[in-house]
Every structure is written in C-alpha cells, then in structure tokens.
Image (tube, coloured by chain):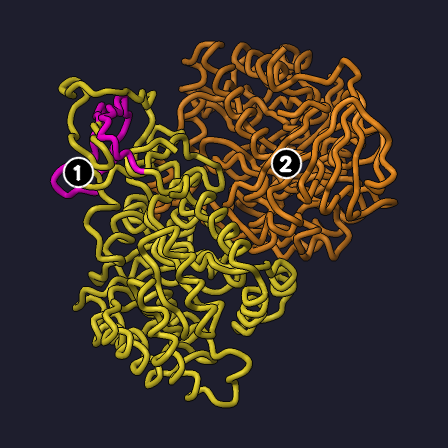
Chain colours: A orange, B yellow
C-alpha cells in the first residue's frame, strides 16, 4: 500500500477543534464558525459546535484556521515520462498550441520503465496531496497501444480508484494515415485490455483528435464494456462533443471553453457536469471558459487541474480556484464548491468533496482564517494540514 | 536576532553539488550544467564545474535540481494589521478598486500592538522565505502619523535593511480636507522620526493620492534627509510620476501600468528601474503592464509582489514570474532575471540577485530540472531548499 493511500483503518477517533471557519459544502449545514469535526476511522462521525463536541482518542487544534473538504481533482494525466518545458517556452514566445506535442510524450512514455512511470506519477500524487487534493482522477492516454495503455492504467489504479481509459487521446504517429484502424484498435483489443483497470472511458473530441462519429463509437463501446463516460471537448473549437456527452449520459464534459447556446442549454438540462480546466488556458495563453454564464444557466460546474506535461503542468487546485475567480467570473465560494463538491459530482461520488457524517474524512486545514484566502492570496502555499482517509499526511 | 536573519558567520564552507542547471545571472558565467557552488560563511566563494570543486566542511547534494539566486522582492508592504478578504470578494463581484480601502488597514494598524505588528510581519517574511525570497524591501505606510510610521519602520528594520518610508501612501482620513498640511507633516516631523530607520523614501503619485507637485516636495525633502528615492506611479492612470522619478534620480518607478511613449523613453535613458507588480493587476482584475515593450525599449525591469492586504496579498515571487510570462510578454529567462537581478538593481545592490564569488550566499534549489518550471508549473510550490546568508533555512 502506498503512503499516499493510508487509511485510518484502526478506527481511531480524532477531534479537530478550534476551527475558525468550517466549509462543509453540505446544504443542510453550510459554513460554521467555532465548529469541530470528529473523525472515526476513515469517515466523518460528527460535525457541530466545538462546545458540544464528543470525546475522541486524539485531538488536532486547528488554531482558528479555516477547514475545507479536500480538493477533488477530477481531470489529470499523471502517467507519463519526460517534460515539455522547452515547448512551453516556445509557445510563450508566440508559437501556437495544436496538441501535436502529445506525441512527444507518447514516445517518452513508451520508452520508460514501469518503475519510472510509477515513481513519476506517485511524485505528482504526493505533490497534489501536499496542496490539499485528496481525490484525483488519473487518465491513461500516453501509451496509445495495447500494452502501454494497459500498464498506464495499472499504474494509475495503484494510485486512485478513479482511473480513466483515454486510448482516444490522439491518433498516434503510426496510425496517422489510417485513423479508422486506430478507432477499431481502441474499441477492440485496447479496450479489452484496459477495462479491468478503468472505471471511466474518455475521448478527446476535437479538431485534430477525434470527430463526433469516432467519439460516439468509442464511448458506446466503452459503455458496453461497463465503463462510465467522460469527454474532453470544445477546448479549442466548438464541436459536437458537449451535446454528444449529454446524449450519451456522460458524467462530465471537460474543457467547455467554446460553447454554443445549445450546448449550454443541453448541459443545464442534464446531469452532465461541465469540468473547467483554467490551468490549460493559463499555460496555452487561451481565452478562459465563461464559468459565470454556465453557473447562471444552471449548469453544474467542476474545476480541475488538467495536470499534464503539455498544456497544463500545474498540480495546484488552489491556483485553479484563484484563476476561476480572477478570470472566469466565479465568486470565491462558487470556485471552492466547484473544486470540491463539483469535482465529486463529476465523478458521481457523494462521499467526497463534502464534510458530513458518513463522508470520507478528507479535509484540509488552511493557513488562513477563511477559504477566501485561496483566491485572495494567489500563489501562496496555504495548505497547513491534510487529513486523507482520516490520516494526517 | 530573528531566525529569518541567521548568517553563516562561523565561516563554515558548504559545497552545493550535483546541480542540474545553475542560473547565475552573472553575465560572464550565464547558465551552467553539472555545476557546483562553494559557500564560505555568508558569501559565495567559488562557482564552476562540479568535477573541479574544492573541498568544503559540508556538502549539499542538489540531486540534479535547478539552482537560482534567491528572489529579490523589492516592493512589499508587510507592517499592517487585519486583512481585507471581504473587500477582495466584493471587488471580484464587480466593485471597482479605488485605493480607498487603505484607510481600513491604517485604522487596524494603529490599533494593533507592537508585538502584533512584529509577529504578523515576521510571519510574512518567513512565508516569503519558504517561497525562495531572500531579500525583501518593506515599506511603512499604514501608520500615517508620526508615531505609527516610526514604529512601522522600526519593525521593518528588524526584518530587513531595505526599509522604505511611505508616509505619503494616502492622505489619512483626519487630513482629507487639508492635504497640504499632511504633506507638511510628512516632510517635517514624520520624516525626521522615520529617517533613522529608513533607507528609502517613497510616494504614491496617483489620482486620489499625491499629485506631481506634492510628490516632488516629498521626495526632495527625503533626499535632503539622506534617503534614496522610489515612487509608486502610473498604476491606475497616466501621470507625471515616471518622469519625475527619472528627473530626481529615483532607483525605481513602481507599477508602470499606464505609460506614455515619453515615459518609456525617459526610463530607457535613465538608471531608474521599472518595477512591475503583476499581483496587483491579478487581484484587482486590471490590465497588466506591457513588460515586453519596456524590455524591447531598453528599460531595466524588476518584478516584485507588492504584498499588501488590499490590492495584492500574494507573497509569491514564483507566481509573479508565471504571470509575467503569461500576461506581460516576458520570456521565462527574462522574468527570472527581473525577479532576481532586476530586483537587486532596483535596490541598487550588486551583492544579491546574482551568483558569483563575493556575492551573498542566497540561493534556491528548485524541485525542478530547470528554472523554466517556475512558469511552466504555475501555482506549484517548487522551492526545495533555500540558503540565506549561507544558512539552509
């Protein structure tokens, strides 16, 4: 078992008290002051006024700090080798981002050993944990052949239960002139090899990646294999992906930067979450999605890092919260909700992203009197203590 | 002596080796690979290829990490009480920023005890240190009467030699209807009380603060009292401040967001540094200064945080580097230069912001193979080890 996956399985109870501000994301409780939380094992057992808190085996004095649910990062690409810092610097000097650089990472990933890939992904998960992320979704998508997609998902599964098969990330170099053969591979042997290690299937539905028909074929095959659906779509251009995601009942449509009115109407009338990834717009110097418009239309919005070596190599959910406030029109409370409860919705989980009895004991003490500081103090490491599965990290 | 001010006064030598990439900011040396640095006491004694490194008392294995000079944050307001998180949230909801909120902090600062102010400022200096800042300039400016400006500078001086008298931050509430009397106070008794604790004098030359004539009077009085000059100017509107700064030989003109062609020409022909503060534009949702245009015109540019509770409560120089690349058109190497050597120029220091024999042993090991990651991995805490005055922090 990895250090990052420890659970308080001994059933020890822990009282977290002297909390200055407690944001539960639980509609019935909301934000509390002078509150306390009791953890029992890996679950929250009790939340209420500090003066009424029951006894516990151990005690954590929050020192007046704000406490929030652990961040739920519902979109990350962590199984890869190499980095693309030089490509980033070139792009910042004016070169446009086309997504072609993914193939650079595919080559490096295929050439890496299992141990190298596992160590690199584990470092990123640990880095995320230190920044308050207690649940992370991890996609494959840099293998793009049967064996390398399978091993990517095997490695991902050692780090999180939220694993996503993204064989349809781009068409790899060796299939560039026969993309339909690649779709047949993805929906056939690659899916069969990947499915035992994956909860989700995802497709990059975009100009230069997969079109609407290909996306439909891949998602339908994934659903038939028992996987649930997510879609990368409308990042660089408008396209059919959002409405396809809604039609097929996908849990999440991710990016959603270029949307039509019909796309927004479709999302608002559905259970499909719009997962916004402002780190990608930051690092590709692209226009940001209009989160304000989505929230006002009644769309459920999540925030995630899109952590990957090409277009968004941040692992910081606090940074994404600050960008969502500065650039996407969300109030700080809306951005925090999207980064916790919103991420949980996009993963169809009700045991994370919220603090209430019975939920997982994933919570973060901030070096701040209020969660507002996540946006008010951008770039500052404000994570004081992380409890994951009831265990202080 | 504060923990943050420890020096390696015992003359112990330390070899930092296995450096993957060494950015010296020293024109004659540039960027080195497989380099080593030897520190002797609080100074750098030797830089060269690792294979040729001399022996030392202690050894730090950088593990292939990138090493850079410690950041020089040449513009910060750290002596204050309270915060203004609610004002920030209101501004993000559409309220415009006028600077009037400074008076809120003045009231809280005057009401705070010496111990409270010292502890709060010390916490911010320590927070900066953890983020790689080894030199910080600290301004007064939330006292705005003789006693509170004096004690603000006394506290600042306990934390840094780079202290700045900013009695002319805004006209305080009690002088609103008689600003000329306030200028007389600033240039008379307040300056006399402040000067023993200050290296610099600064004025906020801006609509709603001090006009060109008032700025000239205050800076001239400061120079006569032996202080060197800095100016806050052209943040919210174009105005006379930049050309006044150049005319009076100020070390730095800070903000420089709204500049005329004549302002840029004046800066380019002078030794006055343009200190850009992108945290302020981020947190006030304002247009960024055009750093690219300044550098191309031959202006010396510095980056600093402007850390303050109203308009820019970041303490993170890495965040400012990332913003300078994303939003202001600097290449990553230019942004790093501005955040180290540029800050040193704005403080007229040649012993910091650069790694060469004889310079202060202020250096940072990054959790990254190259400094490019400061912009490539925005928001991620990448500071692995900080040496300040030769002492690992």
State yes or no: residue B9 in magenta: yes
Instruction: Name the side, left or right, on which A388 lies relative to A56.
Output: left
Reply above or below: A371 against A252: below
Q: Nearer the viewer, residue B294 or A60?
A: A60
The residue that mark 2 highlights is: A212
Q: Position of residue A94 (x, y in %)?
A: 34, 48
Examine the image and state in which quarter residue B77 appears.
bottom left
Locate residue B8, reporting x and y percent: 28, 33
The image quadrant that residue B235 belongs to is bottom left
B330 or A285: which is nearer to us? B330
The answer to whether residue B178 is magenta is no
Picture residue at 17% right of the left edge, 42% below the top: B26
**Rendered residue at 77%/30% (across/down):** A15
Whether residue B319 is visible, yes or no, is: yes
Dot 1 alpha-carbon crowd within 10 angstroms: few under 14, some 14 to 19, many 20 or more: many
Residue range (magenta) = B7-36
Secondary structure beneath dot 1 equals: loop
Mark 1 sits on what residue? Answer: B356
Q: Is residue B375 visible?
A: no
Instruction: Give me the C-alpha separation between circle 1 and circle 2.
Output: 58 Å
Decide: is B159 above or below A306: below
Tell me if A7 is positioned left or right of A258 in this view.
right
Where residue A140 appears, x then y in whole percent? 57, 22
**Where is A204 relative to A91, above or below?**
above
């Amino acid at each position: 078992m990895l250090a990052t996956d420890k659970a308080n399985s001994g059933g020890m109870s822990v009282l977290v008290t002297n909390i200055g501000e407690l944001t539960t994301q639980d509609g019935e409780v909301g934000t509390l002051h002078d509150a306390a939380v009791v953890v029992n094992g890996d679950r929250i057992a009790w939340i209420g006024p500090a003066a009424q808190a029951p006894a516990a085996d151990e005690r954590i004095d929050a020192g007046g700090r704000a406490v929030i649910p652990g961040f739920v990062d519902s979109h990350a690409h962590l199984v890869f080798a190499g980095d693309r810092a030089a490509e980033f610097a070139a792009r910042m000097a004016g070169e446009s981002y086309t997504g072609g650089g993914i193939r650079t990472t595919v080559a490096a990933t295929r050439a890496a050993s299992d141990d190298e890939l596992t160590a690199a992904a584990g470092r990123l998960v640990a880095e995320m944990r230190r920044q308050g992320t207690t649940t992370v979704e991890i996609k494959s998508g840099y293998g793009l052949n049967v064996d390398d997609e399978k091993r990517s998902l095997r490695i991902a599964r050692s780090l999180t239960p939220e694993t996503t098969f993204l064989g349809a990330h781009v068409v790899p170099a060796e299939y560039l002139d026969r993309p339909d053969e690649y779709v047949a591979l993805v929906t056939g042997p690659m899916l069969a090899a990947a499915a035992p290690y994956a909860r989700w299937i995802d497709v990059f539905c975009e100009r230069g990646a997969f079109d609407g028909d290909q996306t439909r074929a891949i998602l339908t095959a994934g659903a038939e294999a028992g996987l649930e659906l997510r879609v990368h779509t409308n990042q660089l251009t408008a396209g059919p992906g959002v409405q396809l995601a809604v039609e097929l009942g996908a849990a999440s449509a991710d990016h959603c930067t270029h949307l039509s009115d019909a796309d927004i109407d479709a999302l608002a009338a559905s259970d499909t979450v719009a997962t916004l990834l402002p780190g990608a717009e930051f690092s590709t110097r692209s226009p940001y999605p209009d989160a304000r418009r989505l929230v006002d239309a009644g769309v459920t919005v999540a925030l995630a890092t899109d952590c990957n070596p090409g277009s968004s190599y941040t692992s910081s959910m606090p940074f994404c919260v600050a960008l969502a406030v500065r650039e996407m029109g969300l109030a700080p409370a809306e951005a925090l909700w999207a980064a916790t409860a919103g991420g949980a919705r996009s993963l169809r989980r009700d045991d994370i992203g919220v603090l209430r009895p019975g939920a997982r004991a994933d919570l973060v003490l901030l070096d701040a009197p209020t969660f507002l500081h996540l946006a008010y103090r951008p770039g500052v490491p404000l994570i004081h203590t992380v409890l994951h599965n009831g265990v202080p990290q």
